[in-house]
Image (tube, rainbow, N blue to C red):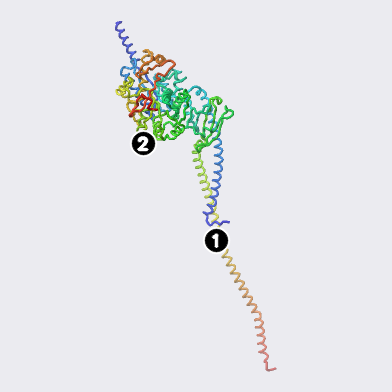
Amino acid sequence: MRKYTSAREIRLAFVIPVLAILAALSVFLYSIFFYSFRKTLEKELRSKGSAVAKTLSTSAESSLVGRDSSTLQGFLDEYKKIDGVEYVFVINEKDEVLAHTFSPKIPDEIMRANPALENASKIRIQTLSWSGSTIIDIGSPIMGGVLGTVRVGMNLSEVLNNALKDTMVSLLLVTLVMMAISGFVVYFKIYKLSREVFQYNSQLVKTSTELETAKLHVVHTSKMTALGEMAGGIAHEINNPLTILMGNAHQGLKIIKTQPIDSE
Amino acid sequence: MIKLITVQFASLLIFTLNAIAADPIILGQSAAFKGPSAALGTELWRGAQAYFDFINSQGGVNGRKIEVIAMDDGYEGDNTLQNTLKLGSDPKVFALFGYVGTPTIVRALPAIQKFNQENGLFLFSNFTGAQPQREPPHDKYVFNIRSSYRQETAGLVENFYKLGYRKFGVFIQNDAYGRSGADGVAKALQAKNLKIVAEASYNRGALLTESMNEQVKILKAAGAEIVISIGAYAACAAFIRDARTADFNGPIANVSFVGPVKLLKMVMDEEIRLKKPLTKMLVNSQVVPPFEDLSYPLVKEFQENIAKFDPKLPENLNDKDYNSIGKTNFTALEGYLNAKVFVEIAKKVPVGKFTRAEFIKAAHSLKPTDFGMKVKLKFTSVDHQASDEVYFTTPVNGSFKEIKDWNSFK
């Protein structure tokens, strides 16, 4: 196990994982959000594009028969102004271009994409990628395909980018603020906690030092006591024979004094 | 006593009549006076105003002066529609006059139709040769003076076909105007069992500095021998420059709306800058005679009246960035002609009955009249286009001259 040598280290050790978890959670949530947002937008663009294509193919019916294409071009130019509409063009039943909104011409890959179906009277939708953008291409037949087709391209990437541009900034801001607040709260809480822990710790250290001193003292004292006792014991052990010796010596002296050795 | 009363009554009557007569005939105009197309509205207005000034100086039409309420639309359809709604609901406005542009007029037509149904409003003359206002239902309440783009392009196709050209390419502005011209070329070729070999478009508002190399490449790749341009001067000048630089040496034709004077000036400036001949094999179809050709009586009086009256736009419509293309030009001459035809018809409306219905009746009975263009103009109840004349011009020493010999374009 790691040893923390300072309160700062402890604080960081808590704050970093918390922020990491928060970041991971945000990324996860935002991914889900973007995915469903894109799905919803795609659905909406499909229906918007279909509405544009259907309206145009209906109005084209009357302006195609024996009329000048400039009226049709006028319609196209107006529809091109609608948010998300990347291009609009009208081809006749022989795939000849009648009017379009491209410059300088309709790119071949777009022309070839989304070809007429077996059942020519049905609206057809295809997703294609063109010059770095995802385009939802909608083909709507004019008069059941007899007069040709209206093709409308909705730029999903652009609409998505435009929609997210503002959302992204606010989401990022919210995330950063959230992370800053939680980081600060965690840091502050841990700061308080770690300070208490370190206070207890230092007290503990102090107590244990005192204890150690006391212990040493006690050991010394008991050592001295034992020495004392041992000295006492030794003295006693010496004393006993000495006492006997002393007694016997006194007895001897007494005997000597009362009974001279020669008179015998 | 009775005599005195009669005299007093008579003078009162004259006074009242004068008061009625003093009411001006007011025309409403929506055109591009500002922005990149300022030349069109400004010059069309100047030409018409020169004639109105002349007529007003002569006492007006049966004593009534002619005034124009002009509004700027910047060549944007939405603005044209708004202006039309304002002018159409203004009870002072007698008729709409001198609109400019195809994408603009295409937006205004339904509004004019609405007013026409309510109160008989109509549009007299406009600076576009597109089809919508020449076809039902709009042709009923629009009087066109000039030939159509269809006639201009058909004339170009016809002349070049005669010279042996078969592979026609078109360079068009990406809007209703360009489409109208391309349609005209396609229709004219269809009659000869031919098709346009390639079409290349550019976005409206393109500048001279922009490259048209992509467009040149598309047309060259398809083997076009001649290109008919339907666009505005800056883009068409850029196209001529880039086509010639890429060694496309076939004829390049432009139509009246391009702004021929400005086009030629730009091409000539590029010629000097690049030190490369750019003005060869250029043709410009026109709906009025060359504006400097004094052999046309219309041109002569136009030059005189422009010089004499030199009309200046009201301050609020004046675009400070607009560089005049010269006091006289094709557009101003067309404006002058429009005004002249209007006045001619207005003079035929019975005095005191100057209503929209009476004016239309007078217009429908306009007998073939020579306005000084060496051809006769007329209206009938089924034909609301006065002129069918197309003039083909080519630049000679910096100005447009009528083409006398087509063989030089072989």
The label shown at residue B274 is: 2
Kind of residue at badge 2: Leu
Q: Residue furthest bottom?
A: A263
- Residue at the image point whose x is 68% and y is 94% from the top: A262
The label shown at residue B151 is: none
Whether tag 1 and tag 2 are in contact, CB under 8 A, the answer is no
Q: Quadrant of residue B354?
A: top left
Within 10 Å of disc 2 (Cα), the crowding (few <14, some 14-19, many 20+) is: few
> What percent of the width, then of the height, locates residue B110?
46, 22
Drawn side of residue B139 relative to residue B318, left or right: right
Dot 2 lies on which element?
helix
- Residue at the image point whose x is 67% and y is 88% from the top: A255
> What percent of the width, then of the height, locates residue B381?
43, 15
State whether discs 1 and 2 lie on one chain: no
Drawn side of residue B164 relative to residue A257, left or right: left
> What percent of the width, then of the height, locates residue A187?
52, 50
Kind of residue at badge 1: Lys
> What percent of the width, then of the height, locates residue B253?
40, 28
